[in-house]
Each structure stands twice: as structure tokens, then as C-alpha cells.
């Protein structure tokens, strides 16, 4: 069944090519399609386009379909183009002419848009909750290992002392920055396009403020043309948010791959969280982190993929936009999967506490020695040359102590302040 059917059937190859993966992807939109339709018919009755009895009949039937969806019994039948067609087909099948009235004052364009906005809004909340759980895990680890020293690197060369408290805390705060992107995408998604019809409004006296309230949107997309320009823009904002979180996870995964390597041996994991080799009996491979790194690097391509798909489209709806679902739907699921896996791994991480006792890390403490001399009154450049000369002559002997007290340093991690930052951002979305 095609909502746009005019009495002829399209060529089978044309139908298969244009529908693509929509039937499978649209199952994730089914609940939202019903919610949008419930709000729409409530509004139609309020402006006189449905009677009270018709509203009651349609509402009951839509709630029955919603129950089917919740039970996992809803399917898009062969020959039905998409979820919107399937819902309307079921209504017409059950109610006859009353079922056909549901589409008054609405185009499939704004119907799809409202489904997507509701879906993306929920997906962004799922991402936010997943990020928050990972953030809390990282903060716990930061406090737990705040006194465990580790080498800090620049150019992958031994540089200055760091700590696991500092390392875990750094990724926690990085997630706060990422959450700003998630919140921004949520604000863009949280605008109601319903009532914009095909992109140019309707001659019916639609109450768009009413559907905005019923669907819990923050505001309508007021201008009906702008509402349809939001398709592609919403996906680009979502893609940017996903890519931001993915970038942080990919960076963390790379660190973990290095820290697990025997040349570093800073961290380890239980055997059941690693994999082995078919030929080398000693191997404990960081496959989870490597797969996560690969998936998150792919996710970082999303903004460019969305941008290229929408770059040269003319104003108004174009069928190219359908392909955005192929990009964004799997991406949000992949990101949440990676976040959950990172949390599982981190909750089982084992941290070495004797790393910097190794002589290879003697030079970590040269800056500490320079600073100690400066505090004793030696000019910085003179102190720098003195310690440099000791290093060159082989007479430098490290003092394996650090005394960092300023805000955000090893001795003052500022984890409560970082937690407050995250709570402030989360309050904007949850």
C-alpha cells in the first residue's frame, strides 16, 4: 500500500530501489508515529475536523496499535511502503472511512519529520544517560587511584609525572565538553515540525501550539519552510554530538591499548575480558579496546557523511533525505554500545602502583627538581641548565616525589567541581 497511490503500481525494481532499508529502519519509528498521530487527531478534533466520537474511535485504535508495538507484534507487511503507511493501513482496515481521516492537515513530510524529531530526542537522552554513567565510573576511578603515579608523555617521550587519578579524571571532564554537543543537538531536535505539512503549511486552521504541548516539544519550528529545512540540520547536529563522544572514547581506547602492552604494562584486565592468539600462548589482546577504537573512528566520519549527503539539495523535501536514516539510526546504537563496553572494561581495570619506581622513568622528575631549585631562590634558567647538565653528565638522581597543589593538578583533582559541571549540563537534557 502506498499513501501516494493514484491507481497504478510502480515498477518493482523502482519500488525496491527507492524504499531501500526503510521498512527495517522504520520499525524503530513505529511508537513515535503513533504518538504523533495521537497528538494530531486530538488537535483535529479541537479545530472541528473530527467529531468527538471519531476522535474516541481513532484514539482507541491507535492505542491498540501502540500496544502491538510494545509487545513486539507490529510489522510492516510486504507491499506496504513504510511505517506511516502501515499504521494508516491498519486504521483503515479496522475503521473504514474514519481511519482515512487521520491524514487531514498533514503530509507524510511533516509526519516523518515529527517521528524523527521524537526519535532523535529520545536517542540523545539515551546517549546522555550512558555518558553520565561512564562519567561517574571515571570519577570513582580518579578518586580511587589519585595517588598512583604514572608517566606523562609528550611526543610519546617520557615527560613529567602524571597519575591515574589525573588520567581518569581527564576523560571524565572531556565527556562534559562532549555533553554540550549532545545538549545542543537535543535542543535542535526538540522543536515541533507537525503542521508544516509538505513544507508550505495548510489551509486548515491547525493548532500547532497544541500539538507542541501534547508531544512535549520545547517550541514549534515556527516557519513552515524552516521546519523542513531542519531535516538534515537535525541529523548533522546529532552526528556532531555522536562524533564528539566517539572521539573521546577512541582516544581512551588508544591509551588503553598502549597501557596494556607489555612495553608499558600500566594496566591489566581479567582474562575473560581479553582475547588470545591461535599461535602465541602468552597473548592477552586488547580486542575490546581495538574494536571500540575502530567503531568510534568510523563514527567520527558521521558529520562529513551527513554534510555530503545534504550539501547541494534544493529547498523543500528531496528523497535523498531518506538515506539519512541509514546513517544515523545505526550510529546512535553503536555509540551506546561502545559507551557500555567502555564502562564494563573500566569497572574491571587493574592499575599498577609501582610504575615510576622503574629506573627508565628517572627523568620524569627533572622538572620537579628544577622547580625545587627555583623555590630555593635559583633563577629558573640557571636551575634548568644545572639539572640539564646533571642529566648529560649522568649525575642526576631523581627525588620521586611530587608536590602539586594547584587546581586541577595531581594533588587537587577538582573532581567535585567537574561533577558540578556535568550536573549543570545534564540538567539541560534530562
Image (spheres, rainbow, N blue to C red):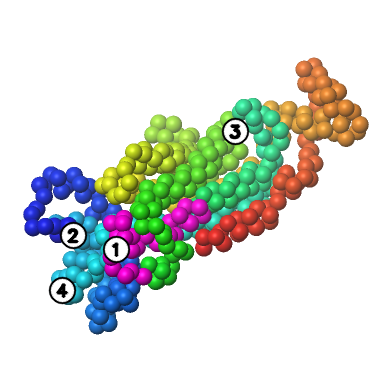
- Nearest to the eye among marks 3 and 4: give it: 4
Q: Residue tagged by mark 4? A: 97
Question: What percent of the width, then of the height, locates residue 174?
Answer: 59, 46
Q: Residue tagged by mark 1? A: 202
The residue range painted magenta reads 183-207
Label 1 secondary element: loop
Residue occupying image coordinates x 13% and y 57%:
5
Q: Residue tagged by mark 2? A: 3
Q: CA distance from mark 3 to mark 4?
A: 72 Å
Label 4 secondary element: helix
Residue furthest toward the bottom? 53
Left or right placement of residue 353 versus residue 55 in this view: right
Residue occupying image coordinates x 32% and y 42%:
313
| Residue 334 visible | no
Who is closer to the viewer here, 250 or 177? 177
269 w.r.t. 277: above or below: below
What numbered label is drawn on residue 264?
3
Residue 405, picture quadrant: top right
Residue 200 is a magenta residue: yes
Amino acid at each position: 500500500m502506498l499513501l501516494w497511490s493514484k491507481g497504478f503500481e510502480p515498477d518493482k525494481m523502482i519500488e525496491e530501489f527507492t524504499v531501500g532499508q526503510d521498512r527495517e529502519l522504520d520499525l524503530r519509528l513505529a511508537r513515535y508515529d503513533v504518538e504523533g498521530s495521537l497528538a494530531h487527531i486530538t488537535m483535529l478534533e479541537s479545530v472541528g475536523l473530527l467529531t468527538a466520537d471519531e476522535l474516541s474511535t481513532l484514539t482507541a485504535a491507535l492505542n491498540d496499535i501502540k500496544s502491538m508495538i510494545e509487545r513486539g507484534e507490529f510489522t510492516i507487511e510486504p507491499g506496504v511502503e513504510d511505517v506511516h503507511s502501515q499504521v494508516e493501513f491498519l486504521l483503515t482496515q479496522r475503521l473504514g472511512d474514519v481511519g482515512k481521516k487521520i491524514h487531514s492537515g498533514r503530509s507524510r513530510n511533516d509526519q516523518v519529520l515529527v517521528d524523527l524529531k521524537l526519535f532523535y530526542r529520545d536517542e540523545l537522552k539515551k546517549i546522555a544517560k550512558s555518558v553520565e554513567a561512564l562519567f561517574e565510573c571515571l570519577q570513582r576511578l580518579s578518586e580511587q587511584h589519585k595517588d598512583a603515579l604514572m608517566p606523562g608523555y609528550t611526543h610519546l617521550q617520557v615527560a613529567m609525572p602524571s597519575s591515574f587519578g589525573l588520567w581518569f579524571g581527564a576523560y571524565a571532564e572531556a565527556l562534559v565538553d562532549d555533553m554540550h554537543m549532545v545538549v545542543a543537538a537535543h535542543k535542535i531536535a526538540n522543536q515541533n515540525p507537525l503542521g508544516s505539512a509538505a513544507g508550505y503549511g495548510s489551509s486548515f486552521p491547525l493548532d500547532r501550539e497544541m500539538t507542541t504541548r501534547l508531544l512535549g516539544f520545547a517550541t514549534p519550528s515556527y516557519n513552515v519552510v524552516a521546519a523542513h529545512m531542519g531535516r538534515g540540520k537535525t541529523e548533522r547536529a546529532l552526528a556532531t554530538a555522536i562524533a564528539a563522544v566517539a572521539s573521546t572514547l577512541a582516544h581512551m581506547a588508544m591509551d588503553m591499548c598502549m597501557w596494556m602492552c607489555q612495553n608499558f604494562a600500566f594496566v591489566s584486565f581479567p582474562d575473560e575480558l581479553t582475547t588470545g592468539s591461535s599461535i602465541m600462548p602468552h597473548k592477552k589482546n586488547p580486542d575490546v579496546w581495538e574494536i571500540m577504537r575502530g567503531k568510534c573512528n568510523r563514527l567520527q566520519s558521521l558529520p562529513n557523511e551527513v554534510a555530503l549527503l545534504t550539501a547541494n539539495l534544493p529547498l523543500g523535501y528531496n528523497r535523498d533525505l531518506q538515506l539519512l536514516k541509514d546513517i544515523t539510526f545505526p550510529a546512535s546504537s553503536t555509540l551506546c554500545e561502545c559507551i557500555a563496553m567502555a564502562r564494563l572494561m573500566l569497572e574491571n581495570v587493574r592499575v599498577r602502583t609501582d610504575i615510576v619506581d622503574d629506573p627508565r622513568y628517572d627523568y620524569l622528575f627533572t622538572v620537579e627538581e628544577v622547580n625545587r631549585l627555583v623555590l630555593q631562590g635559583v633563577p629558573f634558567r640557571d636551575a634548568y641548565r644545572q639539572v640539564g647538565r646533571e642529566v648529560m653528565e649522568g649525575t642526576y638522581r631523581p627525588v620521586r616525589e611530587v608536590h602539586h597543589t594547584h587546581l586541577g593538578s595531581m594533588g587537587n583533582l577538582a573532581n567535585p567541581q567537574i561533577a558540578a559541571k556535568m550536573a549543570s549540563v545534564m540538567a539541560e537534557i534530562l
